[in-house]
Amino acid sequence: MQFDRLKTFIDDVGLVVRSTDDEHEITARVAERLSALLADGYRLPPEVTRASSARHLTYPLYIAPDDSWSMASVVWDVGQQTKVHSHETWGVAGIYAGAEQEIRYLKPTESTASGPLTPAGETRWAPGQVTVCCTTDDDVHAVTAVGSEPTVGIHVYGGNIGTIRRRSYDPATGEVDWFVSGWDSAEDVSRARASS
């Protein structure tokens, strides 16, 4: 039953991605489908909901064969936070468990690239809530796991998010460092736990 729900979601998102290049249309339609998946009681396998005390983890749930989109379970332990970062693609995120505090920033332009980032709002996301976290024109934020349990999000991105070259920002100066996030696997995390 869980597999059928996930397969239907993957098939639906694949159709959406193939039907248009408009990021705003894609994210609106993917957000509707992700909201329905969460509301329908979809349960992630336990091995992709495990937190690490070292850093947040990004488990692949699906990567399209042509790398046109990917789906991940992203897990933060209590209190963990990301750097201020970009995605360089569109993205939709839904909260599966826990809570997340998001701080958004205006995306720097060529004329503002050498100064502090401009805050653009702050939102607390709770289980079942879904947000368009990014489009290429609106793409800079930081998130923190808040509350008393790890935060688990289901994220859908345009492209293979584990291989996309992305920016992290110093919000005080606007200085940029480039990074590739990579993917975490449940097996690697299990081995790391066993050896620690």
Image: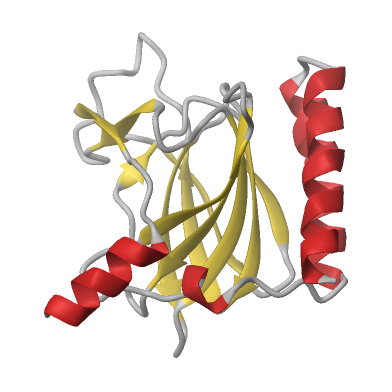
Q: Name the residue located 42 percent from the left edge and 72 percent from the top edge.
A: 145
Between 98 and 63, the one nearer to me in the picture:
63
174 to 20, vertically: above or below: below
Render colour scheme: secondary structure
Q: In which quadrant is the C terminus drawn?
A: bottom left
- Identity of the residue drawn at 86% across and 30% down: 15
172 up-or-down from 35: above or below: above
Kindly identify the residue that appears in the image at 34 percent across and 41 percent down.
Answer: 182
Q: Which of 179/176 is in front?
A: 179
Q: Residue furthest top?
A: 110
Residue 113 x/y as whole percent: 30, 18
Residue 35, quarter of picture = bottom right
Answer yes or no: is residue 161 visible. Answer: yes
Residue 193's x, y, as percent? 22, 78
Image quadrant occupied by the N terminus: bottom right
Residue 162 located left or right of residue 1? left
Residue found farthest to the bottom: 148
Is residue 134 at least partly visible in the picture? no
State left or right for residue 72 relative to residue 56: right
Measuring 54% from the left and 78% from the top, which residue is drawn there? Answer: 46
x, y percent for residue 75: 44, 66
Vertically, is 67 above or below 125? Answer: above
Left or right of 43 on screen, residue 160 = left
Residue 112 lies left or right of residue 98; in this view the side is left
Q: Nearer the viewer, residue 183 or 31?
A: 183
Q: Position of residue 19 (x, y in %)?
A: 87, 19
